[in-house]
Image: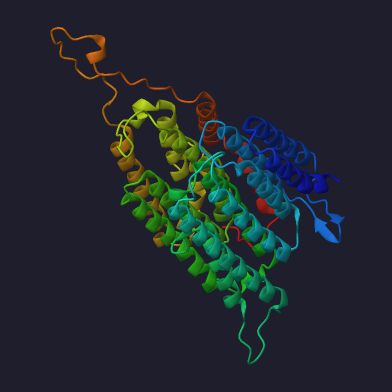
């Protein structure tokens, strides 16, 4: 019964909030209550206790439970932010529908149904991407339509590749027979291409910069923090279900490691040459996806633990970065199109949280990403020095990109000084230049950004509870090698 409630309750609430979507406060309150209910339903469920529902096996593993408790909390914070940050009128119903699909993915065991649901969750995001605010009279911008179409097409292609790989893996018989070529390499290639497209690892990243540049901040956060993270969990489940793909594919796993390490280095380089904060952030996230892909392909205890830790950190930090970005982009009374260079002074909480989130994403101590990066560096050193060099280069280039952005947009001199007034004989108050009234940072999103930043610091300083949970997950995975 709890499994059924976890799946159907968000769907029912998505339909309800869709009908009431113009009542923003009521809709957000109902959605947050739904997410807290999801946490309450998932928390007491036992791990590795299968149940049958309509002929389908449902079960929790330790990894799925960790993220099924995390996703609703992140979604609830994102929905609260929409009270003060721009979003479409259907963002909350789409988010609830997406969370329902993700919850189903995390408790199902059938990889074919999981793949179809993953495609469905990705396609649901398109509805939020092309959405408009309540009462908007303008049509959807051409840039948004292009980004939505590219994302939709590549999501479907990724799903088809994954599904084909799973079909071949299901009929694959391990072992070498005379005169027969093993299809393990083809299967792994299909799965690798599909999941690399879904995770936006370079060179399969085409949709990510356009989506981040065009979409509302909370839509980007929903896509990357929840859909992409779920894709990583599905990939781990596929390797667990078909370990022969790893055992009989040493060359294939090396190719995957090369792709992941190169994605990290190239992502950092591309971030360094970007002028716009959104595109810079998109390439930093693509580089992080490459790091996670490398950790999974390394098939080592340290690599997999680092990949899971980095995935959890990416979900948390992505929301922090996009909440901060939404605050930094708020109008401040200046003419449209004018680039400000003192955003840290103008929005101190948003600017500080954006810098802290960037450092956490890169794995700079004392933030939460450091432990995951350290484990991944350890796995890279065990596999070969060239992998370690590429991962270190990507991290260094990403740090330089963040420093360059801070110098160009955040740390400039204040531009809020009142203009010098020249006293003219006979002048009245009406002749004096009008003073701009600068509104303070919105309290609710600013408080959420501070809460997320504090969480990254707590995890960075005290990572032992999360590491213990991840260690429990690792002990149940069969395709890794202990080194």
Looking at the picture, tell me which residue is in the foreground, 321 or 249: 321
Q: Is residue 242 above or below residue 336?
A: below
**Image quarter of residue 195:** bottom right
Where 111 sits versus 216, above or below?
below
Q: Is residue 311 visible?
A: no
Percent of width and height locating residue 135: 55, 39
Residue under the point 83% across and 51% down: 49
The residue at the point 66 percent across, 49 percent down is 98
- Say which of 85 and 377 sits in front: 85
Query: In the rendered image, is residue 185 in sight?
Result: yes
Residue 109 relative to residue 432: left or right:
right
Number of on-image labels: 0
Q: Position of residue 263 (x, y in %)?
A: 43, 59
Q: How is the image coloured?
A: rainbow
Residue ID at (62%, 33%): 24
Residue 78 image offset from top left, x and y in percent: 58, 37
Instruction: Tell me the residue at 42%/22% (across/down).
Output: 439
**Which quadrant would residue 45 be assigned to in this image?**
top right
Q: Residue furthest top?
A: 426
Percent position (x, y) of residue 60? 76, 50
Judged left or right of residue 80, residue 41 is: right
Query: Residue 111 occupies which quadrant of the picture?
Result: bottom right
Identify the image quadrant of the C terminus.
bottom right
């Amino acid at each position: 019964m709890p499994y059924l409630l976890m799946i159907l309750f968000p769907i029912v609430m998505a339909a309800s909030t869709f009908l009431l979507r113009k009542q923003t406060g009521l809709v957000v309150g109902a959605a947050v209550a739904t997410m807290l209910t999801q946490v309450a339903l998932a928390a007491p469920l036992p791990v590795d206790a299968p149940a049958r529902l309509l002929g389908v096996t449902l079960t929790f593993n330790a990894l799925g439970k960790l993220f099924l408790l995390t996703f609703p909390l992140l979604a609830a914070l994102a929905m609260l932010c929409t009270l003060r940050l721009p979003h479409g009128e259907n963002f909350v119903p789409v988010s609830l529908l997406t969370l329902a699909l993700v919850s189903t993915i995390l408790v199902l065991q059938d990889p074919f149904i999981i793949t179809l649901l993953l495609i469905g969750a990705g396609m649901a995001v398109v509805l939020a991407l092309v959405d408009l605010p309540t009462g908007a009279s303008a049509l959807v911008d051409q840039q948004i339509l292009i980004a939505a179409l590219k994302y939709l097409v590549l999501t479907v292609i990724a799903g088809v590749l994954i599904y084909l790989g799973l079909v071949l893996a299901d009929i694959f018989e391990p072992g070498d027979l005379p005169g027969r070529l093993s299809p393990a390499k083809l299967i792994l290639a299909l799965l690798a291409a599909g999941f690399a497209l879904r995770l936006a690892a370079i060179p399969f990243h085409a949709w990510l910069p356009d989506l981040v540049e065009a979409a509302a901040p909370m839509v980007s956060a929903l896509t990357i923090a929840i859909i992409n993270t779920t894709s990583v969990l599905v990939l781990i489940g596929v390797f667990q279900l078909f370990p022969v793909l790893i055992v009989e594919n040493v060359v294939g796993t090396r190719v995957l490691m090369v792709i992941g390490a190169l994605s990290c280095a190239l992502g950092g380089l591309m971030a360094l040459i970007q002028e716009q904060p959104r595109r810079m952030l998109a390439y930093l996230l693509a580089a992080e996806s490459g790091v996670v892909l490398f950790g999974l392909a390394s098939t080592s205890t340290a690599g997999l633990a680092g990949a899971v830790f980095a995935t959890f950190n990416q979900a948390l930090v992505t929301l922090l970065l996009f909440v901060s970005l939404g605050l930094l982009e708020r109008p401040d009374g200046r003419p449209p199109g004018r680039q400000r260079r003192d955003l840290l002074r103008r929005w101190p909480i948003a600017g500080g949280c954006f810098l802290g989130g960037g450092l956490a994403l890169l794995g700079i101590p004392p933030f939460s990403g450091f432990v995951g990066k350290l484990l991944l560096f350890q796995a890279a050193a065990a596999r070969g020095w060239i992998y370690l060099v590429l991962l270190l280069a990507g991290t260094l280039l990403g740090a330089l990109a963040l420093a360059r952005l801070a110098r160009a947009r955040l740390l400039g001199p204040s531009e809020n000084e009142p203009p010098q007034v020249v006293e003219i004989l006979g002048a009245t108050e009406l002749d004096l230049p009008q003073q701009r009234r600068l509104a303070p940072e919105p309290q609710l999103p600013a408080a959420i950004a501070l809460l997320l930043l504090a969480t990254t610091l707590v995890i960075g300083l005290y990572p032992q509870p999360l590491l213990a949970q991840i260690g429990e997950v690792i002990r149940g995975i069969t395709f890794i090698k202990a080194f």
